[in-house]
Amino acid sequence: MENTKRYIGVFDSGIGGLTVVKSIVETMPDENILYFGDTAHVPYGTRSREQITEYVLNDVRFLSRFDLKAIVIACNTADAIAKDKVKELYPMPVFGVVDPASRKAADSTKNGKIGVIATNATVNSRAYNKEIAKYNADAEVLSVACPLLVPLVENGRFRKDDIVINTVLHEYLAPLREAGVDTLVLGCTHYPLLYDVISSMMPDVNIISSSVAAAEALRNGLEELGIFGEGACGERKYYVSDNAEYFEKTALVFMGDNLGGSVSHVEID
Ligand code: DGL
């Protein structure tokens, strides 16, 4: 039984969840990862709660065909909107990105002012406000929706010398700078790629990647549950609901390395 291959099922609206996979691989390279990217329906961040929930439940239904030991919602938008529903329907450990990043932010702030940048749906859900309040009831949370960042990052506009990303970020970050936040949560899977640009604009601010925080919390969670390393042999497989070739090509930017496994197209609707 010990040696039966088991997977961590990781899903995202598309490609951004690969920043979470990258952090998982760095933290626990032997775990088997089964990734599903709903590339046919990306982005989730501009959609309604009902639509996001429907897509998320389809994603998990697909992953649940495999022998999973845990599910990771590697998408801030999906986690913010539908984590409770996933937990209610699937009796297995469910990990996310919002809770770990909130906890880290709450622990790290000195002046109690935390900024969050995320998609429209994540900001409107107030999920970060609620989670951060659980760990630090006095923290002031200022959230800014940044709808232009996902398409810009996917189009390669994330480098430090790129005038477009600099201009857009300058505007999005202005209210956070004015408010004097000392901690900033990158509350979207795409934003770790913007780390260099953002830290050059906010050099004294502690920047928290929800992708890195998620991998750390996953490792702790698996250890606590006694399933860390169980059925693990470092296998990785990727499934997408749209063009596999496009995913494979763009994936390298998000993973910073090769995917370490095959990509297949799958119909899940
Ligand atoms: N993965 C999403 C998130 O972290 C960003 C892309 C989307 O809007 O679907 O919020």
Image (tube, grey):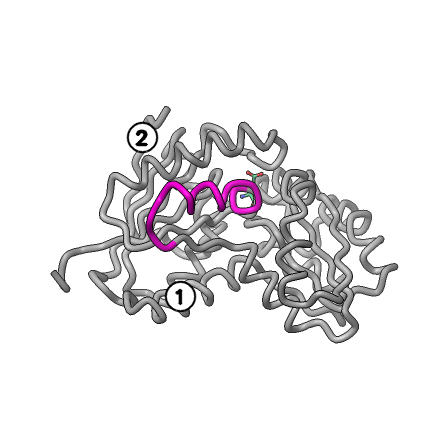
Residue at (88, 59) in percent of width and height = 178
**In the figure, residue 46 lies in which quadrant?**
top right
User: For disc 2, does the CB lie below 8 Å from ligand 1?
Assistant: no
Tell me the number on the disc at residue 266.
Answer: 2
Residue at (76, 69) in percent of width and height = 112
> Reading the chain from its start, which is encountered first: label 2 or label 1?
1
Circle nearer the viewer, 2 or 1: 1
Q: Is residue 93 above or below residue 104?
A: above
The one nearer the camera, 27 or 81, is 81
**In the figure, residue 263 lies in which quadrant?**
top left
Dot 1 amino acid type: Gly
Residue 196 makes an appearance in the image: no
Magenta-colored span: 78-93
Q: Quadrant of the N terminus?
A: bottom left
Residue 5 counted in the magenta span: no
Residue 6 makes an appearance in the image: yes
Residue marked by disc 1: 221
Dot 2 amino acid type: Val
Furthest toward the top, the residue is 269
Most common secondary structure along the magenta stretch: helix
Measured in 3D between alpha carbons, the distance from the residue under mark 2 to the one under mark 1, in whole angstroms, is 30 Å
The one nearer the camera, 164 or 143, is 143
Q: Position of residue 159 (x, y in %)?
A: 64, 53
Q: Position of residue 259 (x, y in %)?
A: 36, 51
